[in-house]
Amino acid sequence: MHKRDLIDLADLRPSELADIVRFAGEISENPSYYKGAAQHKILATLFYEPSTRTSMSFQAAMLRLGGSLIGFDDPSNSSVAKGESLKDTVRVFSNYADVLAIRSPWEGAAMAASLYTRCPVINAGDGGHLHPTQTLTDLTTLNYTLGRLENLTIGLCGDNKNGRTVHSLVKTMSRLKGNRFVIISTPELTLPQYLHDEILANGCTMEFSDSLEEAIGKLDMLYMTRIQKERFPSVEEYEKNKGVFILDRQKMRLAKEDMCVLHPLPRVDEIAVEVDDDPRAAYFAQTEYGMYARMALIQRITERVDRSVPSTLESTHAKRCKNPRCITTQEHYLPRLFDEKGGKLLCRYCEHKL
Ligand code: ASP
Ligand code: CP
């Protein structure tokens, strides 16, 4: 059977997604039961960007499954520093490992890597685009804290423009029945248009707010995010947008008794430390569910054994993607791949419209 990558949760059938979330919950009940499940398997973690949780929870997940690890958390310690291309690095790693998790500042990097590997690739965050394993973490946490993933009013507060965790969450939760979205951000940091389109196309509702105080009372889940400093063109631009929305004890008084607060972390100043003791603050529990979600994913994704190198893809069009953050602007050998959607061409790596 061919390898299956996890680049975007939209690649999974709804039943596969539900299975991973259910399995993660099962693992969380009795993690030691799975201690030999990935024995003799190797996970490679290739982190071209900093990480605490994703990197460490992938590593902890593999170790708890009895598997082993290779990889780097700083590409300057690898031959990337000598000018090695992404294609060559991942091709070599896939000769050594059974599954590869990659994080990159470039949008579409994981998808690009998947074109050249003999083993499955997991997207551990590609620039400001997507972060699917964070969404698996979020869904597993929600399932436990609220007991459901449907018919929820979801507040997204902070950097909805650059927050890749928000993008993956919106894509996934707008496919589940009856969810409503409240977008709480400055106009500069609102959701990208393609995600507005996705919410509406999936039959969900969406409203906008510039006041966390006003919006918080109607929410079942509040998803806070950090303003993504590293995605801003200048420090001045970042300074203009930071510190606008801060969740504190006073605002929590306006929220429902059973509202749940999630945050992918790291936190900067958008949640006051005083909120940490509120029983509705689930963001530290969320980091633990992330490990169980990754234990579930690793087991499912390494079930297939075919280790052939994928055949080379031909460009679909002669044009280039115009998104300056797209991986194709860095790795020029990549085939130019576009899909047609609504009369427009969509870059298959980063989803930008041409
Ligand atoms: N850790 C998450 C990410 O890598 C969120 C963040 O960095 O703010 O996308
Ligand atoms: N949630 C998350 O991705 O955290 P890190 O950036 O620390 O991995």
Image (spheres, rainbow, N blue to C red):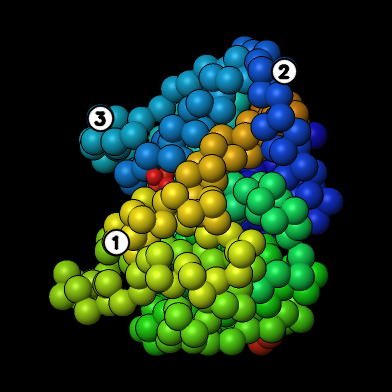
**Residue 179 locus on image (x, y percent):** 72, 73
Q: Nearer the viewer, residue 294 or 29?
A: 29
Dot 3 and dot 1 residues touching (CB under 8 Å):
no
Q: Nearer the viewer, residue 27 or 213?
A: 213
Q: Nearer the viewer, residue 272 or 337?
A: 272
Q: Secondary structure at mark 1?
A: loop
Give, as a three-letter code, the residue at label 2: Tyr
Give, as a three-letter code, the residue at label 3: Asn
Mark 3, ligand 2, within 8 Å: the answer is no
Residue 59 seen by the camera? yes
Residue at 52% from the left image edge and 64% from the top image edge: 223
Question: Nearer the observer, disc 3 or disc 2?
Answer: 2
Question: Nearer the observer, disc 3 or disc 1?
Answer: 1
Question: Nearer the observer, disc 1 or disc 2?
Answer: 1
Distance from Cα at disc 1 to Cα at disc 2: 39 Å
In the image, residue 351 sits, relative to residue 272, either above or below, namely: below
Q: Secondary structure at mark 2?
A: helix
Q: Quadrant of the N terminus?
A: top right
Residue 347 sits in quarter: bottom right
Q: Secondary structure at mark 3?
A: helix
The residue identified by callout 1 is 269
Mark linked to residue 77: 3
Indicate which disc, 3 or 1, sits on the residue closer to the N terminus: 3
In the image, residue 87 sits, relative to residue 260, either above or below, namely: above
Distance from Cα at disc 3 to Cα at disc 1: 32 Å
Mark linked to residue 326: none
**Residue 253 locus on image (x, y percent):** 49, 70
> Along the horizontal axis of the image, is 151 left or right of 52?
right
> Along the horizontal axis of the image, is 333 left or right of 138?
left
Residue at 24% from the left image edge and 36% from the top image edge: 76
Residue at 37% from the left image edge and 39% from the top image edge: 52
The residue identified by callout 2 is 33
